[in-house]
Amino acid sequence: MPLLGAHMSIAGGYYKAVKAAAELGMDTVQIFTKNNNQWRAKALTDEDVRLFKEAMEETGLRMPCAHDSYLINIASPKDELWEKSLDALVVEMERAEALGLAGVVMHPGSYVDSSEEAGLKRIIKGLNEAIKRTKGFAVEFWLENTAGQGTNLGHRFEHLATLIDGVKDDTRIGVCIDTCHTFAAGYGLKSKKEYNATMSELDDIVGLDRVRAFHLNDSKKPQGSRVDRHDHIGEGELGLDPFKHVLKDNRFAKLPMYLETKKEDRDGEAMDAVNLRTLRSLL
């Protein structure tokens, strides 16, 4: 059975994200390792790490991961931003390694005013350097497929394959598949036939053995919109069937799957709990 969880806040301490996830009945958790809208971060303390690992052990949560900062763009044609992004990515990996996380989910990047080809080359260069700088680490780089807004790369499975093929040491490279992004990028997921065709394409181009995790999000926008707007499970354009297809797919039975839906309450109950219950009802 897949491990189900959500992205949780680290406000007040990393361990609080774990405790909050456990209280809502989650099996796993995704966090930011720092403020995701700032370049700088205060150093992790031994106490931060100890409390986080203790909370993981106490709660029994498994396969925790991080999502990298939204500021990072190793596809940037601007050297200064590229260098800054690379340094920030390495810091993210160092923090994730210290916390014992399984992977860091990262958006490939945006090529801005260059081109897809140039952007992909910049990402490959950045990944190779980041892998070199984190040699010996256990934590993996999880490339996330995107909806393809603006000049964002990663909305075609071919983009992910190009990045993986370009990396000299790909042993720590995996992918994270976001259901909302996949659908918004134009891939079919709703019927079993569409789902099977999309997964077959993913397998042919990237390889299902590269899939390390899923982001389970419904989509506010229609298929092929290239717009990234998450919705609660079963309440968007996807409906419930795609989630049933993913959850019942034995090839992904041991993977962590994280919600990234809006944090709000409904009738006094956290929507994370509602979404989890909905997902578990499909198993």
Image: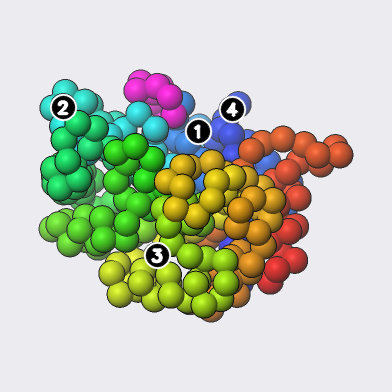
Q: 191 or 102, which is in the foreground?
A: 191
Q: Which amino acid, by three-letter code, is at mark 2? A: Lys
Give the numbered dot on residue 78: 2
Q: Identify residue for label 1.
A: 48
Do the residues under discs 2 and 1 have CB atoms within 8 angstroms?
no
Give the numbered dot on residue 63: none
Q: Is residue 204 above or below residue 141?
A: below
Q: Is residue 105 visible?
A: no
The magenta region covers 36-45
The mark nearer the N terminus, 2 or 1, is: 1
| Residue mark closest to the camera, 1 vs 3 | 3
SS state under label 1: helix
Indicate how the structure is coloured in the image. Answer: rainbow
Q: Which amino acid, by three-letter code, is at mark 3? A: Val
- 255 part of magenta stretch: no
Q: Quadrant of the C terminus?
A: bottom right
Do the residues under discs 4 and 1 have CB atoms within 8 angstroms?
no
Percent x, y for residue 23?
73, 46
The mark nearer the N terminus, 4 or 3, is: 4
Q: Identify residue for label 4.
A: 11
Q: Which amino acid, by three-letter code, is at mark 1? A: Asp
Q: In percent of the image, x 50 and y 55: which residue is there?
A: 223
Percent x, y for residue 215?
51, 53
Q: Left or right: 212 with respect to 282?
A: left
Q: Is residue 203 visible?
A: yes
Percent x, y for residue 56?
58, 49
Q: Is residue 62 above or below residue 101?
A: below
- 40 part of magenta stretch: yes
Do the residues under discs 4 and 2 have CB atoms within 8 angstroms?
no
The mark nearer the N terminus, 2 or 3, is: 2
Q: Identify residue for label 3.
A: 211
